[in-house]
Image: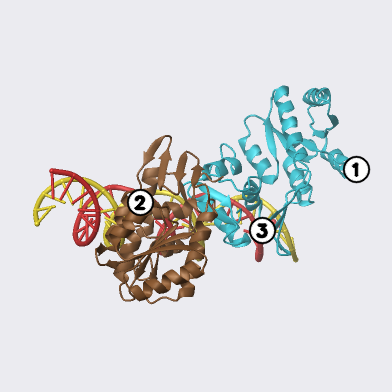
Chain colours: A cyan, B brown, C yellow, D red
DNA sequence: CCGAACCTGTCAGCCGGCTGACACAAAAGC
DNA sequence: GCTTTTGTGTCAGCCGGCTGACAGGTTCGG
């Protein structure tokens, strides 16, 4: 697996780079965002480890720019311990996960393994669900040849269902998946998002199993 | 298929017997209930065609007695046209179906075929659903070695689900199945019966798909 | 035949879930 | 930088579904 490390702290950067290499992964280390851009423009990476405070800009803005350009490379943000808002903003900007400094290098290994497993188990991201054609990598949904735009939240919710076809997912499970610790929601937010998703995908796209949770419709 | 015809009207009896024989089925014709009892005690029949008004008693009482003794032979009752209550009582007593005099003999053929198909397609009536062991022929349900008594209505409802595992059955479909034309129910009767079934079988035995209907739980 | 037990349908009140509307924050466009 | 548009969470009222309680009819047992 090829990793791009974007970290301006030279001590931490060197330790992480060495550890990744020791894990038998390929790793490029840069300390500035413009260098990161150059690397991403010229090579395909399987993972980006992204610090948020960099000398030439904010990691979050960079990540947003990445996602806006259509990049689907998995990104793990590296945050300071006391910056919960950074974590939330990072995840909202499209990060796949975060790690809090100082982190244990063995935990980094676990994350690398997790990312590797996630993408190696699904070489073909195209999924057909009834009348829906889903591209998990491109984050697109087509219905009968018509493209459906999903917002970030809607996509996250939809993806949870697509990854577990036929299984009932409880509202609690959905909340844990969509809202990191510290940013729980009140009221009936999950229900509202499900309703919005139904409006876009069709009423039978998601079925409610009363008292239990939701499941993709038309599974049988 | 072997048929027992219980009909005291000699004209109708002869016509029906001849028709069944022409359909290449084996048929015994009796005009009294005591003769019917003797036949059923000494031979196995695949179907009983049962008139309700007989010289030595009521067909319905006889049917109840049959069911009480544990007989699962399919029974089609023969009723007069203007006796809706006979039909309802017959079905409630355990009849599988009814035909209204005067009936078309080709319709009788269709019913015979239907009965033959129903039992030939399911040679093994034992079904295991999670922790439930169901005997469709004996109409018994065991849960973890414990026998569960279901009333007639509860059984009818349960059977509807067992015959279509994994499929959602709408309340309208259930009502059509449980309540013959002319005896529709008001209010929330189906819901009440489902609730009673859940009380006996466990809350997760039947799941509600909101706005659509019910399905056997634990199907996936 | 009578009383007790059981079955079944109805009712009413409660609970789970849905959705239109709104406010506010963030993103996009000029 | 300002305005417009979009995204997101909350709220409130409505709807679908559940279940305890009850009444009336049927069945069972003495």
Residue where numbered disc 3 is placed:
A130
Residue where numbered disc 1 is placed:
A42
- Does the CB distance between marks 2 and 3 fall below 8 Å? no
Badge 2: residue crowd in 10 Å (few <14, some 14–19, many ≥20): few
Residue A4 at x, y percent in the picture: 82, 35
Mark 1: secondary structure? helix
User: Looking at the image, is mark 1 or mark 3 earlier in the sequence?
Assistant: 1
Q: Is residue A147 visible?
A: yes
Q: Residue at x 59, y 39 (%)?
A: A180
Observer-nearest of A57 and B197: B197
Residue B108 at x, y percent in the picture: 46, 70
- Residue B195 vertical position relative to residue B35 in the rendered view, above or below: above
Residue where numbered disc 2 is placed:
B41
* Marks 2 and 1 on same chain: no
Q: Nearer the viewer, mark 2 or mark 3?
A: 2
Residue A177 occupies quadrant: top right
Q: Residue at x 66, y 58 (%)?
A: A130
């Amino acid at each position: 697996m090829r990793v791009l490390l974007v970290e301006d702290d030279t001590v931490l950067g060197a330790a992480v780079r060495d550890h990744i290499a020791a894990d038998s992964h390929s790793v490029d280390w840069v300390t500035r965002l413009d260098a990161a851009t150059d690397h991403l423009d010229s090579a395909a990476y399987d993972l980006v480890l992204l610090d948020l405070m960099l000398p030439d800009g904010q990691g979050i803005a960079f990540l947003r720019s990445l996602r806006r350009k259509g990049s689907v490379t998995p990104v793990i943000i590296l945050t300071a311990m006391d910056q919960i808002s950074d974590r939330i903003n990072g995840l909202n900007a499209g990060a796949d996960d975060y790690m809090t400094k100082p982190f244990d290098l063995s935990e980094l290994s676990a994350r690398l393994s997790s990312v590797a497993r996630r993408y190696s188990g699904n070489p073909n991201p195209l999924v057909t669900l009834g009348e829906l054609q889903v591209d998990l990598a491109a984050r697109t949904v087509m219905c009968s040849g018509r493209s459906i735009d999903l917002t970030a939240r809607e996509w996250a919710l939809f993806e949870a269902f697509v990854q577990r076809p036929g299984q009932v997912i409880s509202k609690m499970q959905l909340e844990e998946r969509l809202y990191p610790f510290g940013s729980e929601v009140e009221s009936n937010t999950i229900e509202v998002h499900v309703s919005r998703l139904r409006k876009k995908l069709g009423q039978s796209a998601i079925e409610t199993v009363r008292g239990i949770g939701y499941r993709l419709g038309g599974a049988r």
